[in-house]
Amino acid sequence: MLQLLAEGAIVHHQELPIPAIAYGIIALGIFMVLGIVTLSYKDVSNRHSHVDAGEANH
């Protein structure tokens, strides 16, 4: 039964619009930008003058 279904299956092949490696490069670039944005917020609260010494360790 499964063989009959497999023989009758129609497979449509469509090429990718860009090479496969380009998807990985694009994803890597996006993650790098997101990492830079994340690191840019590191210790932002400690830069403000209104933070007193009791809250600096949070």
Image (tube, grey):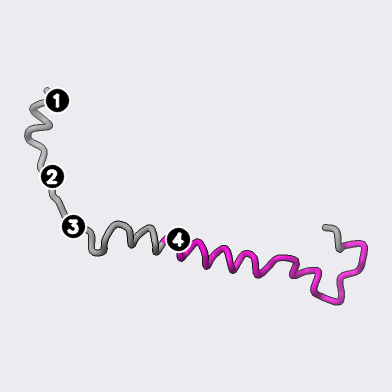
Task: Residue under label 3, please give it.
Answer: 15
Task: Provide the secondary structure element on which disc 1 rests.
Answer: helix
Quarter the C terminus occupies: bottom right
Task: Residue under label 4, please give it.
Answer: 28
Task: Provide the secondary structure element on which disc 4 rests.
Answer: helix
Q: Main secondary structure of the magenta part?
A: helix
Position of 41 with respect to 11 (left or right) is: right
Q: Is residue 52 magenta?
A: yes
In this view, the mark in front (3 or 2): 3
Q: CA distance from mark 2 to mark 4?
A: 31 Å
Position of 8 with respect to 29 (left or right) is: left
Task: Provide the secondary structure element on which disc 3 rests.
Answer: loop
Task: Residue under label 1, please give it.
Answer: 2
Q: Amino acid at mark 1?
A: Leu
Q: CA distance from mark 3 to mark 1?
A: 28 Å
Position of 56 with respect to 44 (left or right) is: right
Instruction: Read off the magenta span.
Output: 27-55
Pointer 2 with pointer 4, Cβ within 8 A: no
In this view, the mark in front (1 or 4): 4
Mark 3 and mark 1 lie on one chain; the one further toward the N terminus is 1
Q: Can you give x and y, in whole percent of width and height, for residue 54 in the image?
A: 92, 62
Mark 2 and mark 4 lie on one chain; the one further toward the N terminus is 2
Q: Residue at x 86, y 63 (%)?
A: 56
Task: Residue under label 2, please give it.
Answer: 11
Mark 2 and mark 1 lie on one chain; the one further toward the N terminus is 1
Q: Amino acid at mark 4?
A: Leu
Q: Amino acid at mark 3?
A: Glu
